[in-house]
Image (spheres, coloured by chain):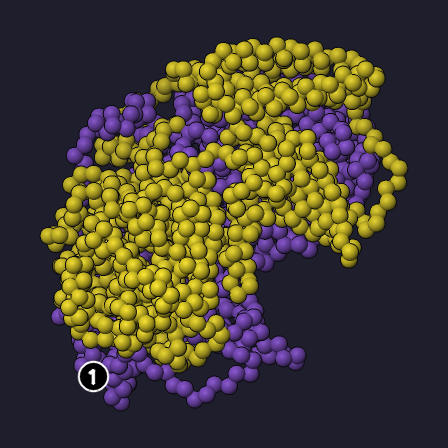
Chain colours: A purple, B yellow
Amino acid sequence: MGTASMNRLAFSLGLILTAGASATAWSAEDLKAVMERRGLTEKDLLAAAKTYTPTGGRDEYLAFSSGGQSGQVIVYGIPSMRILKYIGVFTPEPWQGYGFDDESKAVLAQGRIRGKEIVYGDTHHPAFSETEGDYDGRWLFINDKANPRVAVIDLHDFETKQIVVNPFFKSEHGGAFVTPNTEYVMEATQYAAPILEDGFVPIEEFNDRYRGGLTYWSFDKEQGRIVPEQSIVLELPPYSQDLSDAGKKDSYGWGFTNSFCTERYVGGMERGRPPFEAGCSSKDTDFLHVTNWKKAEELVKAGKVKQEKGMYYIPMEQSIAEGLVFLIPEPKSPHGVDVTPDGKYIIVSGKLDSHVSVFSFEKIQKAIADGKFEGKDPYGIPIIAIQDVLHNQIQLGLGPLHTQFDSKPCIAYTSLYVDSMVAKYDYCEGKVLDKLAIHYNIGHLVTMEGDSVNPDGKYLVALNKLAIDRFNPVGPLHPQNHQLIDIGNDKMQLLYDMPLPLGEPHYVVAIKADKLKPEVRYKSGWDSRSNQKSAFATRAGRESTERTCDAEGKCTVTVKGTVIRSHINPEIIEAEVGDTVSIHLTNLERAQDEVHGFAMYGQNVQLSIEPGKTSSATFVADTEGVFPYYCTEFCSALHLEMQGYLLVKPKGYQATEVTMTEGTLYTQADYDTQVKTNLETQAVIDQVVAYITSKDFKSYPTVLALVEDATDQLGFAQEAKAKAETAAGSQDWQNAMLWANQWWQYQVKAADLGLRAKNLLDEAAK
Amino acid sequence: MGTASMNRLAFSLGLILTAGASATAWSAEDLKAVMERRGLTEKDLLAAAKTYTPTGGRDEYLAFSSGGQSGQVIVYGIPSMRILKYIGVFTPEPWQGYGFDDESKAVLAQGRIRGKEIVYGDTHHPAFSETEGDYDGRWLFINDKANPRVAVIDLHDFETKQIVVNPFFKSEHGGAFVTPNTEYVMEATQYAAPILEDGFVPIEEFNDRYRGGLTYWSFDKEQGRIVPEQSIVLELPPYSQDLSDAGKKDSYGWGFTNSFCTERYVGGMERGRPPFEAGCSSKDTDFLHVTNWKKAEELVKAGKVKQEKGMYYIPMEQSIAEGLVFLIPEPKSPHGVDVTPDGKYIIVSGKLDSHVSVFSFEKIQKAIADGKFEGKDPYGIPIIAIQDVLHNQIQLGLGPLHTQFDSKPCIAYTSLYVDSMVAKYDYCEGKVLDKLAIHYNIGHLVTMEGDSVNPDGKYLVALNKLAIDRFNPVGPLHPQNHQLIDIGNDKMQLLYDMPLPLGEPHYVVAIKADKLKPEVRYKSGWDSRSNQKSAFATRAGRESTERTCDAEGKCTVTVKGTVIRSHINPEIIEAEVGDTVSIHLTNLERAQDEVHGFAMYGQNVQLSIEPGKTSSATFVADTEGVFPYYCTEFCSALHLEMQGYLLVKPKGYQATEVTMTEGTLYTQADYDTQVKTNLETQAVIDQVVAYITSKDFKSYPTVLALVEDATDQLGFAQEAKAKAETAAGSQDWQNAMLWANQWWQYQVKAADLGLRAKNLLDEAAK
């Protein structure tokens, strides 16, 4: 070759040269020609300008969408409509290590149903934590309809931290909704079932022994965890309770939950009975449940509520006696129940009605205070007459479903499922202002911070169902379509169609991006799921592998290891067949993009170890053999060499005396050449170091993190250098050369980090 | 209320009215103001115009990306850079039912390693099937690095149909690459391991008993399946084989596979040995493996190759003796090996080199023909001298990695990992033409159809690693960044940053969208995974539930059911505790957007049943209780009522005589009102039917599908009407009213389908 050492030098020197490419890669084609070629109208161009976000640009809002039957949460930016993250919630998500590392397995294990591990969810309604009714950007809650559960996601690192199972419900659709200071997270049943019993109850006893319910999950904002033992469950009639919203401002302390199938119809086509759909939609009204959580809380504090299944449980008779629950007829098979930003009105959308019904909280309170009821339901709950509390009803179109609010007073937007439209209207005056066709079958919609006490308006996203013809066809299972609509002007303008390729997202909440201040790395040795230092945190040089056996001869190999570009320490792990292997790896890096992964052949081991994190994989080595492992993130040019082997030996295996035969032998000349390269590289590094230390680099956290990493690498380089020199001193050219090479590897990484630090400093100086 | 029946009528009549909203929702803000507000330059606007795709627009290309450690495949459109689909491949994907329905569980079960179910993969390199070196749009192949496997995806429905496990390998990175007529799919090992043995082999015997290898998986294009028993495995030295490419045109019949760590170094930091990264990067060259698959195939046909583990296995000695494998030194720790469209050159990128090396296939053939070798490797494989076969070496920059081609002759693009750049150059003349900085750490790249014999060029996508600062921060785990670059002009222009929130996508292939003709529905009762009529296909009215017990008293409840908006038939399933429950559901719909789901409380049951499909869920009902189930797709306004119950009774439970107590009782007046509504609705339907049948609706498959569905619904309406009238005849007003309501439900669905058919006809007429 001859060029090898030149290449090496170019490689190391090149690290100090910044990208030299032309910055004027302007296209030869002009705007008009592009528009013509692509068939864009001026209106399209305006829409493009309203959403297109150039490289490095930031979105104004972050949307958190349920992932439907994926069981996850989807995070995307508005107005760019680009998906930034999936958060593993109820379903294992291997690339995040979620459901694979021991730490997150413990979170998923909290969500077991009747002892059974559940490996998916049907996420429906995300909700932000609130302070005084405003999003505070700290937590996100989301429910699982299929298996009645609620999850808590920490917005400091976008990770799921807790899953609670509702021990009373067997189905729930209406969660999560939070009270204005995140005192409680609301979760209502959907399909009635026995509530205190878990066993079989004949369906013929539906009216008597099947029940609905509403849970107010107590949330500890200090710990960031739901506290089941402080939570309150209200028994409700066997209606299909649906969505909820918490009262705010004027209506603070109250909750509103709608329902369908108050006919209490039970289908059974196979028995010759008309199907559920017939019997559940025959009445013209269902019931809005009005509940007083503040008073329920007082009852709990007064010691008047019994515990069942580890939570406070309030039977219907007690709720009725204490005035905790009231019903109001609402037209018909409603879905959305949405409290206006001032808390004065509750807007209900009856999917089989053509109106939204606007209820006045003041009138509701008056009816309750006056004891003015039109009757009771079969379970004795007082019914308030609709005409006593209605503010108005506004004819919008077919299939009204969900309502969100604008920053302008009295302005609301409601989705129309059957019409495939969005209606904008004045709910104070009862006047329709604008309607826009969408594509197609809109479910929920969201405006920016649209269900808080201070909606921003600006954009609206329509969550449309299967997008049969909006995009290139991709087989019988179509993407969903989230359409971005500009609501900044009098007329709504459709801006963008965003295909969503994951489940059926039901509901989205959107928050001002600047309210979120996510971390970029963890403290060293951090267990992110329990949010504390891991018992297995390991520092560089302190890696260990231990095999211990208990009295029954059950053995465990415990590895406390580290990962740093570009090696996993240890590189060889030995076990005997049948051993439990427990591998705990700490990522020693501080640079943001130095996530390392850890995958192993045939063992379902897949970790994602972000800078600082300690992640663990425990499994039984149940067959003898050779199991390669490696880093799954492209972390450096030597990423593929970040590898190792688990060797699972026969039980009681005794090694015969074998020494490693080297594949390649090195000479003094190899060593000398390597050392020459290293010294040249050091000169480059010294320049970078001099440059950085001449600046106020400690003022920039990102730069400081890089410098700390670089300093680590230079420390390792010194250790490798010492080893190389020791080996050379005893004329062991093999080890001398290899350690000299490793010394250079550390130098290259230090130089790379240093260069990035330098570039960031230069950027900052601009 | 008083308005109820009016609402009802509005509801049904409204179905005939098309969306009446203003079509001129033009914004008040002008383009200049928007650009100013959003900080867009003219260059940004041009880029926006090149990518923005208005509602209903189509992308020119579809990109199929590996999903890295997610184990899946990601499909997105170019130039809009919108994600259209995830395809479940190696990881369960609940919202698709993948890994949840029995049919897809059987596919995942093919991928078991040593009997163990593997619940993720590390997908790396997708490849399209080819005919004469050109993409034919029929199949996609992708590998799993962690667990050496290859999957086959059918592009007719974008579903994974087959997974094959490589029984020889314990790791593989370099797959999948196809030969020009999809005769074979290439898959190479990564980390050497015992190849014929599965048990423990001491790592000290690395040189002698650890091996690499290269598999040519035989593919049956008629069946669309890999045929292991026709496939060929070449034993190779314990180098870390990496990527491959198949020869084409001039080099047809040959394959090229590069490698790193030809030093055969084994690390072991925990033993005081320098790490892998030091020993695996100390030599200046590694080896390009040149293999003759055509000749290997001839040997197989001549009966000269033995079978091992059910495949044809060629030991190194045989390969050497028959001239199947040759080595060429290649600089240094290379990644990409890419054959030019004409098949004349092979471009190798050494990640630790600053050049790409262009090898001449003609020169390689001459050296082989002349028997001109510079020596043999330790295993006796002939080594061709690099200077004998090099066409040229082109200095591009640091960390060259992967090369793709343009439609213009001799033009190639190579990613530069360390420099974070893309280089454009003329590989015939050895001249660099342009360089563009990307953000950051590019791995692979793709041009349109860029590794076929007829590249389109036009766009290039740079697959960049963790996007630390390109988007809003979302915690320590960042999205990836696929940057779209316009390569239609002399200078490259960056157009768009697309965050990718799923794993670390390694490699993308992109195909002309019009080459794909995916299906929109299945034939009725179709098992899509085995691509044949399901044994459990069920027609309307033929639903059944049977409980059978074997001699040991093990019982199975077999449900053959159907789903159609908006009911699941059966609505009540009964079992005894311990029974196996096997539910098979056929979606009776033909309309494209009428996918139904099926989820059940606490049983890990989650099906996605696209129109025509039959999906199955089998589980053991291991606890007594009441288990609600429901449809997980928002399929109609009565979607939430699409529900049912599994009742798991105690063993040997005998029902006491209980009859259903109705929750709501109906009178003759209710029935009469309902019938009146139904007759009015029928008048509306008759208008729609008259309109449609006056047109040539059979010429439009989509319209025809809707009309067929509507006809079904009207048939059901007739049945419900008859039942209502029978009940009314015997003054059973309860059943009369409920069936009358169900009659109306069918009418509403028929009207909805009819309206959609009418709208499509009107569209077509424009």
Q: Mark 1 lies on which chain?
A: A
- Which picture quadrant has residue B719? top right
Report if residue B149 is visible in the image: no
- Foreground residue among A38 and B455: B455
- Which picture quadrant has residue B712? top right
Residue that extends furthest to the front in the rendered view of this protein: B302
Measured from the top left, where is residue B340 in percent x and y?
21, 51
Is B91 placed above or below B41 here? below
- Which picture quadrant has residue B369? bottom left
For label 1, the residue is A668
Is B232 placed above or below B51 here? below
Measured from the top left, where is residue B540 in percent x and y?
65, 30
Is B360 placed above or below B380 here? above
Asked if residue B440 lies left or right of residue A148, the reply is left
Q: Residue at x 19, y 55 (%)?
A: B345
Q: Quadrant of the C terminus of chain B?
A: top left
Asked if residue A102 lies left or right of residue A243, the reply is left
Measured from the top left, where is residue B559 in percent x and y?
69, 41
Q: Which residue is drawn at 22% across and 26% down?
A: A32
Asked if residue A275 lies left or right of residue A587, the reply is right
